[in-house]
Image (spheres, grey):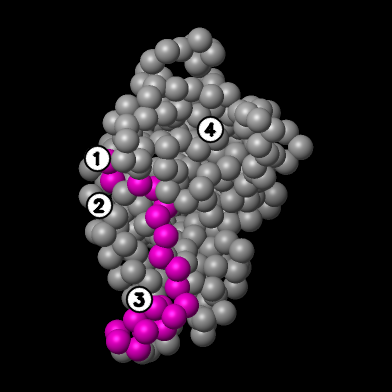
Amino acid sequence: MTHATAHADFLHARAEFDPGAPPVLSVAQGQRFRLEARSVLTDPRFETAEDFSIFSIPVTGPVRIEDVRPGDLVRIDVHEIHIADRGGMVTMPGRGGFGEPLGMHGLIVPVHDGFAHFPDDVRVPIRPMVGKIGFAPEGESPSSSTVGRYGGNMDCRDIIAGASLFITAQVEGGLLYAGDLHAVQGDGECSLTAVEMEGSVELSCRVVRPAPVGGPVVFAEDRMIVLGDGENLDEAATVALDEMMAIVRADRGWTRERTAMLLSATAHVAVSQLVNARRSVKVSLDTRYLLNAPFQTKED
């Protein structure tokens, strides 16, 4: 059966991953749907603002996926990302990863012809991505600016068109939220923001067979990327490494020691996001090092 593409605009944006919010859409498994995303430039005050702390980037949702139950592993396919022709960036005192504090500053970045155009004719190739995506967690309504095992503000630059994201649902229907589109972002998002964009993302969701995972896993460009979060980068890295080890051990049946040596030779540990209250780290591994398909990345 063919379903039309369902759609929710950014008037349905929320500041939390709220499990109690009424769904803005209800879709069948495998049905494509499109969510519009707000950005800092959605608010016209950005153009003349002097205090950029008043701006925030919410998520759109929630979307109920039919027949999703708590504990189901859900594959979220990112089909398309569409972005506007200009984005916004800010710096703020006390935020960012730099030693010397940054000042309060905003910048509008034109985006066209495949590049983000910075001052002095500096052109940065764009790589549109989704910064915030995840399911509503059970029993809490975390801010859309934080991150956890449910997904959230992961700021993983690998969540691009063509990627598949695996997250375990915690509530009936999953209740998916997404937003915070970026034209381009470096690993870490070190100044506080990427090139923040209005736009839309087209997704579909499907329950897949169980896999040895507790948190978000991304497949993109022939790589498996495991996300970890924590109060600091060390904690986040340990979470991501332990989950990667569990996946590879389940795939190969190896000891922890042999698996650790393979990962030390082949996996890449990188900062996903270091500017929010909870940090995110990712561990990526080429899929050619997996014997089997521990995640159902396509229909069987």
The amino acid pointed to by label 2 is Asn
Earlier residue among tags 4 and 3: 4
What residue appears at the point 45 percent right and 35 percent down from the top-left corner? 193
Three-letter code, disc 4: Glu
Q: Where does the image place residue 143, in percent across and percent down from the top left?
A: 31, 35
Q: CA distance from mark 4 to mark 2?
A: 24 Å
Residue on which the image places disc 3? 245
Across and down, in percent, residue 148 comes to 31, 50
Task: Confirm whether the magenta stretch covers residue 217.
Answer: no
Q: How many marks?
A: 4
Q: Residues within 10 Å of mark 4 (few under 14, many from 20)?
A: many
Which is more toward the observer, 178 or 100? 100
Which residue occupies 48% across, 33% down?
60
- Label whose residue precedes the other's in the sequence (3 or 1): 1
Q: Which residue is mark 2?
A: 232
* Camera sees residue 260: yes
| N-term-proximal mark, 2 vs 1 | 1
Residue ID for mark 1:
140
Of circles 1 and 4, which is in front?
4
Q: Inspect the image, locate mark 3, and give the three-letter code of the amino acid beneath it.
A: Met
Pinpoint residue 209: horizontal percent, then vertical percent.
46, 69
Asked whether the beta carbons under mark 4 and mark 2 sit within 8 Å of each other, the answer is: no
- Disc 2 secondary structure class: loop
Q: Magenta residues?
A: 256-278
The CA distance from mark 3 to mark 2 is 20 Å
Calculate the distance from the C-alpha at mark 1 to the C-alpha at mark 4.
Answer: 27 Å
Q: Residues within 10 Å of mark 3 (few under 14, many from 20)?
A: many
Q: Is residue 138 left or right of residue 5?
A: left
